[in-house]
Amino acid sequence: MGEEVSVTTMPQYDVILGGGGITGPAAFYALARYSDVRSVALLERRGGLAEVASGHEGNAQSLHDGSIETNFDLAKALAVRDAADLVAGFLDRHPGQGISVPTHKMVIGVGRREVALLRARYAAFVSYYP
């Protein structure tokens, strides 16, 4: 079947993350950027990242509240937040069902222009999305 690997030659990692969807790479980035972890492996069983629920058609199966939808202006973001709050309230009243798992979100700006846009957006949104 596969090639045998002995324990003495097997790569060693401080942390091994499973899944190349939204959460796996986000955790990988957070560990690499903000921790003293020296080696991280990300395992994905498919051919590439974000090929299932995290892909563009799956929409990450996450509850969007307007905070990270960078194509929304403040008015639209707040309307989305109001609707998302209704769903979040329902999920809070039905804990233990396995249908809601709180996790972190991230918006990334690439390059000076996008970073400047995100800084301006943050200034406009921070009092509504603390």
Image (tube, rainbow, N blue to C red):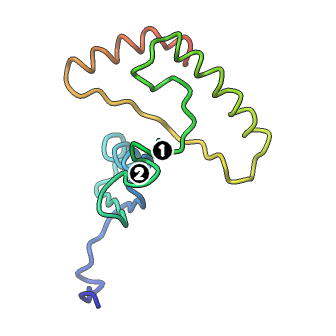
- Tell me residue 76's x, y (percent): 52, 15
Q: Residue 56 or 20: which is nearer the viewer? A: 56
Whole-percent x, y for residue 81 in the image: 60, 22
The amino acid type of the residue labelled 2 equals: Gly
* Quadrant of the rendering where the N terminus is positioned: bottom left
Q: Is residue 88 left or right of residue 59?
A: right
Residue 67 position in % (x across, y down)? 50, 23
Picture quadrant of residue 114 = top left
Task: Say which mark, if any, is on residue 60.
Answer: 1
Q: Residue at x 69, y 33 (%)?
A: 87
- How far is mark 2 from mark 1, CA to CA? 8 Å
Can you identify the residue that label 2 sits on?
A: 21
| Residue type highlighted by circle 1 | Ala
Where residue 98 appears, as percent x and y from the top left, is: 68, 54
What kind of element bears circle 1?
A: helix
Task: Say left or right for 76 vs 9.
Answer: right
- Are the residues at dot 2 and dot 1 in contact (C-beta closer than 8 Å)? yes
Q: Secondary structure at mark 2?
A: loop
First-in-chain label (2 vs 1): 2
